[in-house]
Image (cartoon, grey):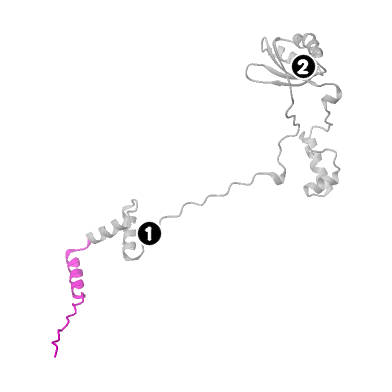
């Protein structure tokens, strides 16, 4: 509707994927809630004799409630001032003024702006080119909303060593409740915990299982 408010109810319903009746109810609800404040036509200011655009910075002598309200009422009653913003920074107010030419603005400056309640300083900036003048609000359509960011999976836990030594290492780690040691250190610590008799038995077993060297019998030639 911000792009084209002249669309029929059926066209709007087809665009949003609803039937006309619920679509009309939603539009009516937005009008009642003040989301839609009204409908108007966009007019090219250069085609109606207002090619001069001026940005005016205004400072007030004081900021009493009575003076501020008087200034804002006078600004609201002046048709040539099409926009008024109360801002922070050097200026108290920033006005947008549309005029026919420089001569007309000079007359408006002396006859109106300088006589507004509480005005002490006025700084005018003539607009050379209007690069962008968008009146539509940046409200995303239902299909244009940003997709949620993908969830990041937690890092996988390190693989524990398998087998008898791995099981014993896991038990030692659970008892000590410390950080896991490298697998090579776990193997060394397990061998250190073995008794001397067990290590000697392992060495003797390796000695018995060691294959005997093959002896070649020399034969004398006949």
| Rendered position, 110 above or below 18 | above
Q: Earlier in the sequence, mark 1 or mark 2?
A: 2
- Which segment did they paint magenta? 193-222
**Badge 1, how many Cα within 10 Å: few under 14, some, many 20+?**
few
- Residue situated in front as seen by the camera: 171 or 113: 113
Compared to residue 85, the image places residue 38 above or below, namely below
Residue 208's spot in the image, x, y percent?
A: 18, 75
Secondary structure type for disc 2: helix
> Could you say which quadrant of the image residue 46 lies in?
top right
Q: Is residue 219 magenta?
A: yes
Q: Residue at x 73, y 28 (%)?
A: 131
In 3D space, how far apart are the residues under numbered discs 1 and 2 (Cα atoms)? 77 Å
What residue sits 31% from the left and 62% below the top? 168
Tag count in the figure? Answer: 2
The answer to whether 71 appears left or right of 220 in the picture is right
Does the CB distance between marks 1 and 2 fall below 8 Å?
A: no
Does the stretch in magenta take in 84? no
| Residue ID at (79%, 32%) | 37
- Identify the mark at residue 160; answer none if there is no mark: 1
Circle 2 sits on which residue?
A: 75
Where the C terminus falls, by quadrant?
A: bottom left
């Amino acid at each position: 509707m911000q792009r084209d408010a002249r669309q029929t109810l059926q066209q709007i319903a087809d665009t949003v994927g609803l039937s006309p009746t619920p679509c009309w109810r939603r539009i009516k609800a937005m009008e009642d809630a003040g989301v839609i404040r009204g409908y108007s036509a966009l007019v090219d200011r250069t085609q109606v004799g207002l090619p001069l655009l001026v940005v005016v910075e205004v400072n007030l002598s004081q900021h009493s409630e009575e003076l501020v309200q008087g200034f804002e009422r006078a600004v609201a009653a002046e048709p040539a001032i099409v926009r008024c913003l109360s801002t922070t920074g050097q200026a108290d107010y920033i006005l947008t003024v549309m005029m026919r030419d420089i001569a007309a603005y000079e007359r408006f400056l002396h006859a109106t702006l300088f006589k507004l309640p509480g005005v002490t300083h006025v700084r005018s900036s003539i607009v050379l080119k209007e690069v962008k003048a968008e009146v539509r609000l940046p409200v995303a359509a239902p299909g244009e909303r940003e997709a949620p960011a993908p969830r990041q999976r937690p890092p996988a836990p390190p693989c524990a060593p398998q087998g008898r030594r791995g099981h014993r290492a896991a038990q030692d780690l659970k008892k000590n409740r410390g950080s896991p040691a490298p697998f090579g250190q776990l193997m060394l610590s397990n061998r250190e915990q073995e008794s001397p008799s067990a290590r000697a038995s392992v060495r003797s077993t390796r000695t018995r299982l060691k294959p005997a060297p093959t002896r070649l019998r020399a034969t004398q030639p006949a």
